[in-house]
């Protein structure tokens, strides 16, 4: 186990180092903000069954992005989450790209301290690879603290209608996973998201969004509203 953890940390460190070197001579940017959502629905699963605020902080330099993201339910601390992530985009053409990255999910209510990456601890490590063009496809796989090494594949298609940005999406789990509650290959979530900015003044507008999400595996559905600050 210690050898496995050391390997994961080494790969992660080399990944970050190589991305930084590849973006050494380009302009950098820091972004911050927060979302407030009526429910935190992640891949068809409801975390906390509560209104949730989700702060975010990111740093980008060329094709490299590194960020931190949190989710905090208003009435259920056991659903709290703090993630750090990194991704690197590789242009395939003027309109298409390939992205490589990794996310560290940290759950404060789970056993284990923040710097404890032991098995059955409070971290899940998830590398991902994605394609983006007229449509997007991204594959994710858990490599730490998930006995099933769960895989999740998401495909989405963005379009516009009446000045509203829309995105149709579908998520697929190809095998048994305790994390997703599946016993075999299944569609995990399917839905449609809509977003637009409501203009109040020349200097202030509020981005709002609504998502309709169905989880065929659990036979549940959600209609989620949120806004961004």
Image (cartoon, helix red, strand yellow):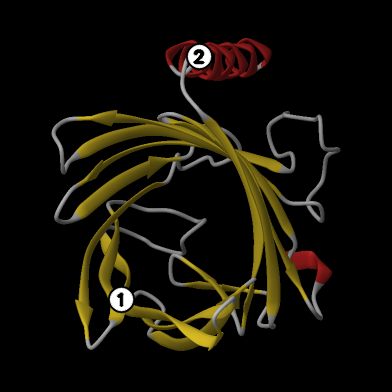
Name the residue located 60 percent from the left edge and 80 percent from the top edge: 39
Q: Nearer the viewer, mark 2 or mark 1?
A: 2
Q: Is residue 125 visible?
A: no
Front residue of 229 and 214: 229
Q: Nearer the viewer, residue 166 or 27?
A: 27
Q: Nearer the viewer, residue 121 or 130?
A: 130
The quadrant holding residue 204 is bottom right
Asked which quadrant contains residue 38, the reply is bottom right
How far apart are the alpha carbons under marks 2 and 1? 34 Å
Q: Which residue matches tag 2? A: 24
User: Residue 169: x and y, percent?
Assistant: 27, 68
Task: Give the residue displayed 23% in from the left and 88% down from the top.
Answer: 162
Number of labels in the image equals 2
Q: Which label belongs to residue 101?
A: none
Where's the N terminus, which quadrant? Answer: top right
Q: Is residue 69 found left or right of 8 in the rendered image?
A: right
Residue bearing mark 1: 165
Image vertical order of residue 14 relative to residue 106, above or below: above
Estimate the x, y position of residue 145 in percent, counting from the top left: 61, 38
> Element type at marker 1?
strand
- Above or below for 51 versus 86: below
Q: Position of residue 96 (x, y in %)?
A: 17, 41
Relative to 42, 81 lies left or right: right
Extreme residue in the right direction = 113
């Amino acid at each position: 186990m210690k050898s496995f953890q050391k390997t994961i940390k080494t790969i992660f460190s080399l990944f970050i180092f190589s991305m930084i070197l590849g973006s050494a001579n380009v302009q950098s940017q820091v972004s911050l903000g927060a979302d407030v959502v009526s429910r935190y629905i992640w891949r068809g699963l409801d975390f906390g069954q509560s209104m949730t605020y989700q702060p975010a902080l990111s740093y980008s330099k060329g094709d490299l992005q590194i960020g931190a993201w949190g989710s905090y339910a208003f009435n259920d601390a056991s659903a709290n989450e703090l993630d750090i992530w990194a991704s690197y985009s590789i242009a395939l053409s003027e309109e298409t790209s390939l992205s490589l990255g990794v996310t560290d999910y940290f759950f404060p209510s789970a056993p284990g301290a923040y710097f404890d990456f032991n098995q059955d601890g409070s971290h899940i490590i998830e590398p991902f690879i994605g394609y983006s063009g007229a449509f997007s496809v991204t594959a994710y796989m858990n490599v730490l603290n998930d006995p099933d090494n769960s895989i999740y594949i998401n495909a989405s298609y963005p379009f516009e209608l009446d000045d509203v940005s829309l995105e149709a999406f579908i998520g697929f789990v190809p095998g048994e996973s305790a994390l997703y509650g599946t016993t075999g290959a299944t569609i995990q979530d399917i839905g449609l998201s809509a977003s637009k900015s409501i203009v109040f003044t020349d200097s202030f507008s509020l981005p709002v969004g609504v998502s309709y999400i169905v989880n065929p595996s659990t036979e549940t559905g959600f209609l989620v509203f949120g806004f961004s600050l």
